[in-house]
C-alpha cells in the first residue's frame, strides 16, 4: 500500500510511531508548554488568593485593634490622668498615662506583625517553577 506524496506515514495498530513530522512534534511541545503555563498561572492565582486572605485578616485585626484602642485610650487616659493628677500633679500623671499607652501600642504592633508574618506567599508555585528547566530538558527525575 503506497502513501501519497506529502502525507505522513501512519503506522499500523501495535506498531510504534517512530517517524513523526517536525510540525507534529512542535505542535505537541507548544500544546504541552501552553498547558503548563495555564496550570502554573492557576496555581499562582490560588496561592495568591490564600495569602491575600491571610494578610487581609491580619491587617483587619490590626485596624480594628487600632480603632478600639483609640477610644479606650481617649477615655481611660483622661480618667487616669485626672485621678493621678490629684495625687502627684497633672504633668507627672500625663507622663505615666503616655508610657502605659506606649506599652499597649508595642504589644499590639508585635501581635499584628506576627499575624502578617504568617503570610506564606506562593510556595507551591515557586517550587514548580524551579522544576520547569529540568522538565524542559527531559530530566524530570532531577525534580524528585
Image: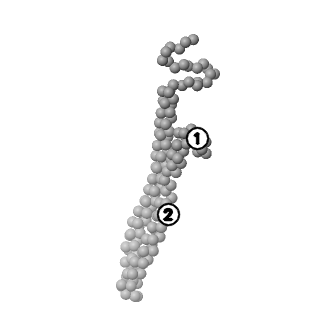
Q: Which element is circle 1 on?
A: helix
Label drawn at residue 109: none
Give the quarter of the figure containing the N terminus. Answer: top right
Camera-side residue: 137 or 79? 137
Camera-side residue: 34 or 27? 27
Disc 2/disc 1 C-alpha distance (Å): 38 Å
Q: Earlier in the sequence, mark 2 or mark 1?
A: 2
- Farthest residue in the left direction? 90
**Percent of width and height locating residue 91:** 36, 84
Determine the residue positioned at 49% across, 30% down.
Answer: 26
Q: Which element is circle 2 on?
A: helix
Note whether residue 60 is visible: yes
Please rate how many residues cluster around mark 2, counting C-alpha atoms within 10 Å: few if below 14, some from 14 to 19, many from 20.
few
Q: Is residue 114 shown above or below 37?
A: below
What is the number of callouts on the image? 2
Q: Is residue 34 shown above or below 54?
A: above
Which residue position holds label 2? Answer: 114
Label drawn at residue 140: 1
Determine the residue positioned at 49% across, 37% down.
Answer: 33
Left or right: 37 as drawn, with respect to 1: left
Q: Is residue 12 shown above or below 78?
A: above
Determine the residue positioned at 50% across, 27% down.
Answer: 22
Please rate how many residues cluster around mark 1, counting C-alpha atoms within 10 Å: few if below 14, some from 14 to 19, many from 20.
few
Give the quarter of the figure containing the C terminus. Answer: top right
Whether pointer 2 and pointer 1 mark residues with C-beta atoms closer than 8 Å, the reply is no
Q: Is residue 133 shown above or below 97?
A: above
Camera-side residue: 22 or 132? 22
- Farthest residue in the top direction? 1
Note whether residue 86 is visible: no
**Percent of width and height locating residue 55:** 45, 56
Amino acid at each position: 500500500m503506497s502513501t501519497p506524496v506529502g502525507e505522513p506515514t501512519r503506522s499500523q495498530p501495535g506498531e510504534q510511531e517512530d517517524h513523526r513530522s517536525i510540525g507534529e512534534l512542535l505542535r505537541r511541545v507548544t500544546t504541552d508548554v501552553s498547558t503548563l503555563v495555564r496550570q502554573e498561572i492557576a496555581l499562582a492565582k490560588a496561592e495568591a488568593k490564600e495569602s491575600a486572605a491571610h494578610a487581609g485578616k491580619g491587617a483587619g485585626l490590626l485596624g480594628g485593634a487600632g480603632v478600639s484602642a483609640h477610644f479606650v485610650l481617649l477615655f481611660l487616659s483622661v480618667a487616669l490622668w485626672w485621678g493621678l493628677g490629684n495625687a502627684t500633679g497633672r504633668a507627672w500623671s500625663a507622663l505615666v498615662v503616655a508610657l502605659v499607652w506606649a506599652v499597649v501600642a508595642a504589644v499590639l504592633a508585635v501581635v499584628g506583625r506576627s499575624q502578617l508574618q504568617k503570610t506564606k506567599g506562593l510556595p507551591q508555585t515557586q517550587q514548580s517553577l524551579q522544576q520547569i528547566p529540568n522538565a524542559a530538558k527531559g530530566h524530570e527525575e532531577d525534580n524528585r
